[in-house]
Image: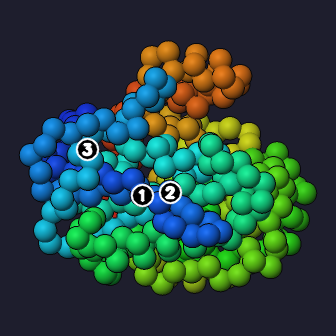
Amino acid sequence: MKTTLAALLLFCLTPPVLAGNTAIGFQNTTLADPVRPLQMVVWYPATTAATPQLIRDDEVFHGALAVPDAPPASGTHPLVVISHGYGGNWGNQVWLASALARQGFIVAAVNHPGTTSKDRSPEAAAQLWQRPKDLSRAIDAVLAQPKQFGAVTPDRIAAVGHSLGGWTVLESAGARFDPVLFAKDCNVHAQLSGCQAYQRMNPDSAKVAADLRDKRISAVVSLDLGLSRGMTDASLATFSVPVLVLAAGADAPELPAELESTDLARRLPKASTQYVKISDATHFSFMAICKAGGEALIEESSPGDGMICHDGDGARPREVIQQQVVALISGFLAGPVDDKR
């Protein structure tokens, strides 16, 4: 695995909330639309001496520090858009968004209607093909407002997605989904969470199979994705942008790396694909860090869901796993390097 050693050392020595010295701003906005309004948050390098505040910090999860509505820093900055998983929200990856912003990235994340923790509308969830379009709308919005979020380096726009968000960003960059292929595969691997989620959403097959690519996206990062087995071999073999595929090594029967992330990496072009399986990470290690007592609060309101606070048996603390993930992603987005893990 290729990564940047200097970045890895930096993140091993600094806690995630305070990594780096760059001031960062934060804005929470809504992208208006009569049919599909989107909540979008943006983290960005800022010019400010104001005291940062904790963003998305609550009784259950740790947040991250930023200065709300701070003026953006001068110059141009690479842009990263983030897509959350099924039933998640933009808060799941505050640790990643804030860390990348401290390194000079503008980072935008959206809540995908119908598949967020507070919006489970079946009608909106069924519009699975809209998820890549949501990311395109976020890119449009950030590019259109350089005085609000900072100016974007046009040829450096990346997309990062967790779980169903991983499927979303691959589709945004050129992967094509075949519902018939996926249905046949689910007859064999019915235990996969992607099969169950897809059945619940029941999207329009023709619209999901369409070309959903946004040609502005120049790199993709997948965090323990699902639904990849419905992506066609042809579209993956000719995938035209670099991809970093990160997998949870603490396998769960419903989302084993071998059938999802590992299989995806095998089918992508070897020259432009990097793959890392993090042995002590679970699917939920890519989500926000739970506070002491957070699991009990989750169990109280939603029995069985406290597992999102768990990492693998004998795992490093989640913040250390996430430091590794940030280092891998920042090294990948920085471009080719010559050290291999």
In the picture provided, is 299 more to the left or to the right than 110?
Answer: right
The residue under label 3 is 66
In the image, 4 versus 284, the foreground residue is 284
Instruction: Tell which circle, 3 or 2, labels the residue nearer the N-terminal end.
Output: 2
What residue appears at the point 60 percent right and 23 percent down from the top-left corner? 298
What residue appears at the point 80 percent right and 79 percent down from the top-left corner? 206
Q: Is mark 1 on a helix, strand or loop?
A: strand
Q: Which amino acid does label 2 sit on?
A: Gln
Q: Quadrant of residue 11?
A: top left
Residues at discs 2 and 1 in contact (Cβ within 8 Å): yes
Q: What element carries label 3?
A: strand
Q: Quadrant of residue 94?
A: top left
* Rendered location of residue 116, percent (x, y): 62, 48
* Rendered location of residue 332, percent (x, y): 34, 63
Q: Whole-Å distance between the Cαs marked 2 and 1?
A: 6 Å
In the image, 206 versus 262, the foreground residue is 206
The residue under label 2 is 39
